[in-house]
Image (cartoon, rainbow, N blue to C red):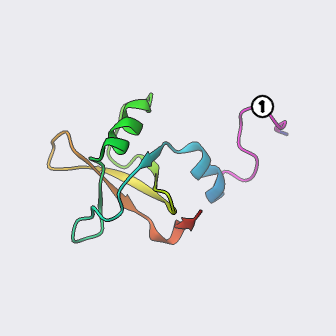
């Protein structure tokens, strides 16, 4: 049994809330999307949050994209083998604040 305050999420491992709490959070402008609804991670807020992530970014990494009104789970995708990243939202996980 996991004790409260132990630093481990409470609940089943596949619980969306647990995944959301453990995933890095990245501020985005949801208006900055590609035609296929991928979100650019190139705003000042996005860059600041990306710099806070302690683990190396890898394609497919689960993150939470957020702004002042909304958050949604997503996976990272590198843009054309470059230094730019996109978030691919799973819109079924969107949550309004």
| Range drawn in magenta | 2-14
What residue is shown at x 59% (from left), y 51% (from top)? 19
Out of 9 and 66, give the one closest to the viewer: 66
Q: Is residue 43 above or below residue 92?
A: above
Q: Mark 1 — residue? A: 6
Give the image quarter of residue 7. Answer: top right
Secondary structure beneath dot 1 equals loop
- Residue at 58%, 52% (x, y): give it: 20
Residue nearer the viewer, 71 or 57 = 71
In the figure, is residue 55 to the left or right of 23? left
Name the side, left or right, on which 9 lies relative to 2.
Answer: left
- The spot of residue 92 in percent (x, y) is 50, 71
Q: Position of residue 80 (x, y in %)?
A: 14, 49
Residue 55: x percent and y percent? Answer: 43, 30
Q: Residue at x 21, y 44 (%)?
A: 84
Query: Looking at the rendering, which quadrant does residue 35 occupy?
Result: bottom left
At a point 83% along the width and 38% down the height, the residue shown is 4
């Amino acid at each position: 049994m996991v004790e409260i305050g132990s630093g481990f999420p409470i609940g089943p491992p596949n619980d969306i809330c647990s995944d959301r709490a453990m995933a890095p959070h990245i501020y985005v402008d949801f208006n900055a999307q590609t035609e296929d609804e991928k979100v650019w991670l190139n705003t000042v807020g996005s860059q600041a949050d990306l710099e806070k992530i302690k683990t190396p970014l890898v394609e497919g990494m689960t993150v939470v994209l957020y702004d002042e009104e909304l958050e949604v789970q997503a996976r990272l995708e590198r843009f054309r083998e470059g230094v730019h990243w996109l978030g691919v939202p799973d819109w079924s996980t969107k949550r309004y604040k």
